[in-house]
Amino acid sequence: MKKKILTALICLVILFMQTELYAFVDPNAYHWEGQQQFFEGWYFKVSDPDTGKSFLFIYAVFNPDGKSPESCGFMMAGNNSPEYAGFIFQQFPVAQFISSYEQFDTRVSEENRARGDRNSLHAQGSATDGEDTCSWNIDFEITERWDKTMGWMAGLQNLQTYWHVGAMKARATGWIEWNGELFEFEDIIGYQEKNWGDEFPESWYWLQANNFDDPKACCLSVGAASMPLGSVIFPACGIGLIYDDRLYTFSFPQQPAFIRPEIAPGSWSITAVKGRHKIVIEASCDPEYLLNLMNPTEQGIKPWTWEAINGEVRFRLYEKWGLRWFLRADATSNLAGTEFGGKKWLGWNVGLPD
């Protein structure tokens, strides 16, 4: 009898870990717990295949306790349109930053607010750097999610960086005005995710695509970083693909996936194998369109991120039968998010034209 009770308790503990009760609170909600070193940022992207325009918007806070001279809220806006690459970074007093722990409702300033739930999101705001100006008001209807993006790793304490994809794909409706040019749209392609933690990693790469030439290929997200865990640094990676209404995931160390990346500025090549499935991802972008974004570090907010939102991503999905791999899907997306960053890449663009 005691043995059965003990077995039942063990099963309950395992069930508790697997269901991740901490995730019942919307991961898009606020995570700060009083740490002196902390950041949190919410990322939105919209792309219009008809015009070739892509925009990104980031709502963020850095060291919200206000004790650091660099404590602030900040906004970023990016624009990759045909023959154009523009980026805006604007800081705001940290006292203006407000965010909810119970639900996703964040304000960087009075005019910059993002909110939502599991089914819909709203982002509005305005940012300027003195040269460029952008305003926006966008509603997102979420059509695809990647719940528990990090798996059991999201329950670990004191990781350097956490990652959550709130909307792998969404229908976006609203307007964007960039330097006086108004762009109105209805049901174009949207995406949303977030990061939080102490700082961005020493090195990372990221891909996001949801405008594929195969209608069965819905969306792809990739996030990978050199992740410190105690004194050990390991290559963490999460890949999520929704194809033919099924979510395929290839993650390490959350899953027994083998992942081999080859990354260079403007070029990404990744092979991942888990069980009977294999995915081969190839991505590229024109370096002239890379936006030099800002990211939090222990040394402050630094321009150590390079991202284009009009890149190209191709994936091939294989399934193994017996000893052979059979191709199940081969699809390509333009207007994709392609990014790399961290100290490792400093100086990569020395000698390139401004």
Image: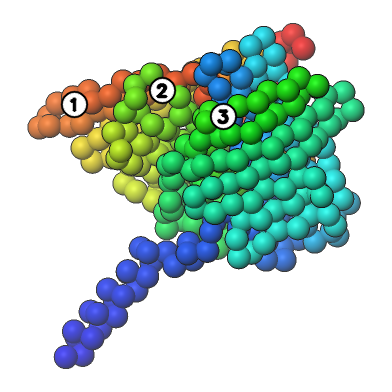
Distance Cα–Cα, label 1 vs label 2? 23 Å
Q: 10 Å neighbourhood of mark 2: few (<14), some, or many (≥20)?
A: many
Residue 305 found in image quarter? top right
Q: How many numbered discs sit on the rendered protein?
A: 3
Direction from residue 311 to residue 16 in the image, left or right: left
Q: Pinpoint residue 111: horizontal percent, then vertical percent.
A: 80, 45
* Pair 1/3: label in front: 3
Q: What element does badge 2 sit on?
A: loop
Q: What element does badge 3 sit on?
A: strand
Q: Is residue 63 above or below residue 305?
A: below
Residue drawn at the location 66% of the way across and 55% of the way down: 105
Give the residue type that dot 1 points to: Trp
Direction from residue 67 to residue 17 in the image, left or right: left
Residue drawn at the location 60% of the way across and 61% of the way down: 103
Marker disc for residue 17: none
Q: 10 Å neighbourhood of mark 3: few (<14), some, or many (≥20)?
A: few
Residue 162 visible to the viewer: yes
Distance Cα–Cα, label 3 vs label 2? 19 Å
Give the residue type that dot 3 points to: Glu
Q: Pinpoint residue 127: horizontal percent, then vertical percent.
A: 80, 35
Q: Is residue 195 above or below residue 15?
A: above
Marker disc for residue 212: 2
Circle 1 sits on which residue? 325
Q: 10 Å neighbourhood of mark 1: few (<14), some, or many (≥20)?
A: some
Location of the C terminus (image quadrant):
top right
Circle 3 sits on which residue? 186
* Pair 1/2: label in front: 2
Direction from residue 313 to residue 290 in the image, left or right: right
